[in-house]
């Protein structure tokens, strides 16, 4: 039986395959946080690539920020990267632009092409893990491959420690 969730998962698998990347999807179970996902994957928290989406206040378009699991997006720095003020993207906009529900937004396989930025911290690892289109699935990928597939720009947009 196919569900909308499985369609999302299949869309991510197809996007990765079309980009020439072979990955195995891992089931998370009830992991609801980046730390829980890291525990399931057996990796460091910062090896979890969170897909954080904002809405451009001028363009109205979604902007994707791929952030290391232990980092938080700084709104002012993210706005500077995007070249426009950013606001919260609501669940309906995220679903319309990406095809994914909040909690399972993958960095690839979106319904529309999003401008994307990548946290440089993710490039410090040989392998990182990202949502596979559902809140219950992740996949491992080399950061350079994810950078290439998403067309992201590496940028400093996270909060800096005090």
Image: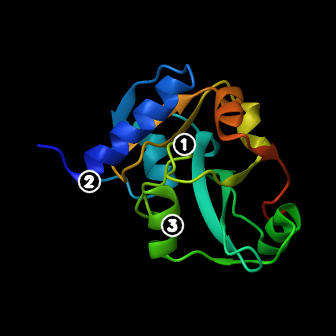
- Badge number at residue 9: none
**Residue under circle 1?**
108
- Badge number at residue 94: 3
Residue 77, position in %: x, y? 85, 67
Query: Residue drawn 39% across and 58% down?
Result: 32
Judging from the image, what secondary structure is the residue with disc 1 in?
loop
Query: Residue drawn 43% across and 50% down?
Result: 36
Left or right: 150 as drawn, with respect to 101 = right
Answer above or below: position of 149 versus 21: below
Q: Residues within 10 Å of mark 2 (few under 14, many from 20)?
A: few
Viewer-closest of 73 and 93: 93
- C-alpha span from label 3 to label 1: 13 Å
First of labels 2, 3 by sequence position:
2
Residue 134, position in %: x, y? 36, 50
Query: Residue drawn 84% across and 62% down?
Result: 160
Residue 31, position in %: x, y? 36, 52
| Residue with the most extreme left position | 1
Image quadrant in which the C terminus is located: bottom right
**Residue under circle 2?**
4
Left or right: 57 as drawn, with respect to 38 = right
Residue 122, position in %: x, y? 71, 40
Answer above or below: position of 125 versus 56: above
Observer able to see residue 162: no
**Can you tell which quarter of the image residue 114 is in?**
bottom right
């Amino acid at each position: 039986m196919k569900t909308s969730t499985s369609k999302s998962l299949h869309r991510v698998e197809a996007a990765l395959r079309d980009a020439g990347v072979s990955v195995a999807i891992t089931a998370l179970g009830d992991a609801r946080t980046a730390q829980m996902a890291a525990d399931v994957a057996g990796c460091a928290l910062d090896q979890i690539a969170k897909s954080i989406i904002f809405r451009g206040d001028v363009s109205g378009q979604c902007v994707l920020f791929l952030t290391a699991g232990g980092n938080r997006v700084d709104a002012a720095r993210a706005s500077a990267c995007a070249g426009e003020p950013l606001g919260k993207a609501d669940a309906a906009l995220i679903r319309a632009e990406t095809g994914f529900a909040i909690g399972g937004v993958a960095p690839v396989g979106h319904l529309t092409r999003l401008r994307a930025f990548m946290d440089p911290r993710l490039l410090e690892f040989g392998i990182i893990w990202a949502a596979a289109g559902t809140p219950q699935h992740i996949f491992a990928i080399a950061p350079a491959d994810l950078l290439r597939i998403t067309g992201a720009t590496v940028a400093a947009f996270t909060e800096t420690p005090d």
